[in-house]
């Protein structure tokens, strides 16, 4: 890609200590989620999959206390303290070993679920899920505009495929396929 550079940032911890990288299955709670959200999240996760690992999912269910440190990778929709935030990934680690990653999507946002372009007042769930799942891999924000891991994706925009910087970061953590 002309004019591109590799500028991914790493969290400093990853899942390579696990026999099955990515740890345990992810659990999606669909309470408060738009219809079809779980399917979109699974498709976004599959975009990161390659020969070294796959995101896997358990049966959908909601946990009584999703905030506890239980080594369950959990995805839900709910309130977020910062009203400017669309979603966040909360990683728990011991040194360089990731142990858990939870993702929360803001229930205050208008989410676009379809395959077309989102409306100007909507956030594209696939794009945001793809980004947050990148954090769960161990990636931080990239300095490359247009990469999945770039710091911001505005309402009405979508980015549904990994860019060279995203792939380079993934491969740095988990090896070249």
Image: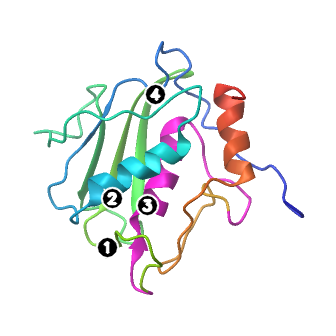
**Residue 137 within the segment the image draws in magenta:** yes
Q: Left or right: 98 with respect to 142?
A: left
The residue that label 3 is drawn on is: 126
The tag earlier along the polypeptide, 2 or 3, is 2
* Nearer to us: label 2 or label 3: 3
Report how far apart the C-alphas of labels 1 and 3 lie in the structure.
14 Å
Q: Upstream in the sequence, badge 1 or badge 4?
A: 4
Looking at marks 4 and 3 on the same chain, the residue that comes earlier in the sequence is marked by 4
Q: Is residue 96 above or below residue 38?
A: above
First of labels 4, 2 by sequence position: 4
Q: Which residue is mark 1?
A: 109
Quarter assignment of residue 14: top right
The residue sitting at the left extreme is 64
Element under disc 4: loop
In the displayed structure, would residue 47 be above or below residue 143? above
- Residue 22, which numbered label? 4
- The part of the chain drawn in magenta is 120-146
Res. 166 mark = none
Q: CA distance from mark 1 to mark 2?
A: 8 Å
Q: Secondary structure at mark 2?
A: strand
Which image quarter is the N terminus in? bottom right
Q: Residue at x 48, y 79 (%)?
A: 117
Does the residue at mark 1 contact the one at mark 2 (Cβ under 8 Å)? yes
SS for dot 3: helix
Rendering coords of residue 93 (x, y %) = 46, 26
- Residue with the mark numbered 2: 105
Task: Left or right? Give the position of 168 relative to 134.
Answer: right
Q: CA distance from mark 4 to mark 3?
A: 19 Å
Point out the frontmost of discs 1 and 4. Answer: 4
Residue at 40% in and 43% down: 90
Residue at x 67%, y 59% (from the top left corner): 147
Give above or below for 130 relative to 13: below
């Amino acid at each position: 890609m002309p004019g591109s550079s590799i500028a991914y940032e790493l969290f400093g911890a990853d899942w390579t200590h696990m026999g099955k990288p990515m740890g345990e299955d992810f659990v999606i709670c669909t309470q408060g989620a738009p219809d079809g959200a779980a399917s979109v999240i699974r498709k976004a996760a599959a975009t990161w999959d390659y020969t070294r690992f796959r995101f896997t999912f358990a049966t959908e269910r909601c946990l009584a206390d999703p905030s506890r440190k239980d080594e369950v990778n959990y995805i839900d929709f709910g309130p977020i303290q910062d009203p400017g935030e669309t979603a966040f990934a909360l990683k728990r680690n011991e040194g360089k070993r990731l142990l858990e990653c939870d993702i929360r999507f803001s229930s205050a946002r208008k989410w676009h679920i379809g395959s077309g372009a989102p409306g100007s007042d909507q956030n594209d769930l696939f794009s945001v899920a793809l980004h947050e799942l990148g954090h769960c891999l161990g990636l931080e924000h990239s300095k490359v505009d247009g990469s999945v891991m770039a710091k911001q994706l505005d309402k009405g925009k979508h980015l549904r495929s990994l860019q060279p910087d995203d792939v380079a970061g993934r491969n740095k953590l988990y090896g070249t396929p």
